[in-house]
Amino acid sequence: MNKEQTLQQDAKVIGLVATAHGVSHFSQLLLASLFPWLKVAFDLSYAQLGLLMTVFFIVSGVGQALAGFVVDKAGARTVLFAGLACLGTAALAMSLAPNYGMLLAGSMLAGLGNCVFHPSDFTLLNQRVSLSRLGHAFSVHGISGNLGWAAAPIFMTAIAAAAGWRVALFSAGLVAFAVLALLWVYRAVLATPAAHPAASHQAAVQDGALLDFMRLPSVWLCFAFFLITALALGGIQSFSSSSLRALYGMSLPLATAAFTAFMLASAAGMVLGGFLAARASRHDRTIALAFTFSGAMALIVATGAVPVWAALVLMGMVGLGAGVAGPSRDLLIRASAPKNATGRVYGVVYSGLDAGVAIAPLLFGALMDASRPAWVFICIGLFQMLAIVTAINVGNDTSKRAAAAPA
């Protein structure tokens, strides 16, 4: 295969995997986007609405830790197809829900579908994309997730306002099945080497027992890294707008615009981060610099002492730093994963992301209830800086193992 053919192959794999990842993030906000309609339709409290999201992320987090084992055994492509089918089925089922119980069941099924994407996606990218383009692949992967988050509220609220929440959920289900059909048409592009008994035995001899990877400190440091950064992200997603309104007296549209600035700058940061990751050898150092910058910007916002326009710019800077760290973060995990355990490592590590996103609303909601809006951004900044410690330790542990490998 010549260089041009390799580029075309890599582009197809990256595009297909990124599209599927966008659907995953899109599906995470389906119910949240429809809370105003669901509250009226089923006479729900805010606690009941929040439980729909908590159930989703609990199932996704637990399932993600287990999905990596299934990916390594059954193949990433098969598991990815199953995840898309679950998301589509869940959306269609919730569109027909006669009561709150069915919404909860649909949210659980959606969480089950969501849990497969990170172990499947990163296994496919690592196996099917050239090493020189992996930084860019992880960059596009991250951007597609942000775009999915951005698209869901617009898509769902527009359809719900025009035709009702049931039609909106039904339409979301069709989106998932349309992407599944696209991936099925190009399934050959996503094919990975078949596992043979002899090869599996040899891999077991080389890599040790199935759970040996869990003895590696770097795996649990990566888990801690994701948990901590997800706490910061969850705070921004859940209560940054409310905190900005309390600190700066912003209107709701302006506070929402600040969050949009964070998301757009984060996507731009991922593009830049892809180029930096492709050139760097110590990804932990890139992460440390990016999160130091991002955390410092969040702490400045927390002061409440800057002009409103400056707070909007600083929110963008917080997102930029977080975005730059994204591709290096994923390459750092790749370096820490033993061969033939990629799916398992990504599954366990990324379950920390779901855990953090599930915990964050409780923590930051308590701060807002206690009339401490500044502490929302103080905690965001502190969490990002605390993540630096875990990233550097991951890099050091991985370097030690690499140095000791020849011996």
Image (cartoon, rainbow, N blue to C red):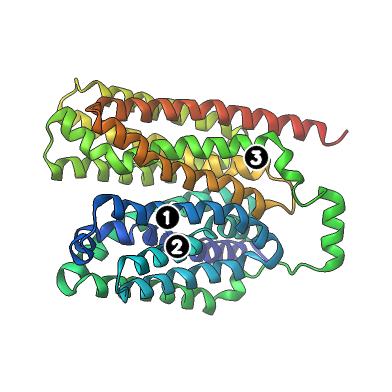
Quadrant the C terminus occupies: top right
Q: CA distance from mark 3 to mark 2?
A: 27 Å
Q: CA distance from mark 1 to mark 3?
A: 26 Å
Q: Nearer the viewer, residue 126 or 343?
A: 343
Q: Nearer the viewer, residue 47 or 30?
A: 47
Q: CA distance from mark 2 to mark 1?
A: 6 Å
Q: Is residue 89 above or below residue 215?
A: below
Q: Amino acid at mark 1?
A: Val
Could you say where residue 40 lies in the image, as x and y percent from the top left?
Answer: 17, 62
Residue placed under numbered mark 3 in the picture: 219
| Lower position in the chain sequence, tag 1 or tag 3 | 1
Q: Is residue 348 left or right of residue 26?
A: right
Residue placed under numbered mark 2 in the picture: 108
Q: Residue at x 51, y 51 (%)?
A: 61
Q: Nearer the viewer, mark 3 or mark 2?
A: 2
* Residue 104 appears in view: yes
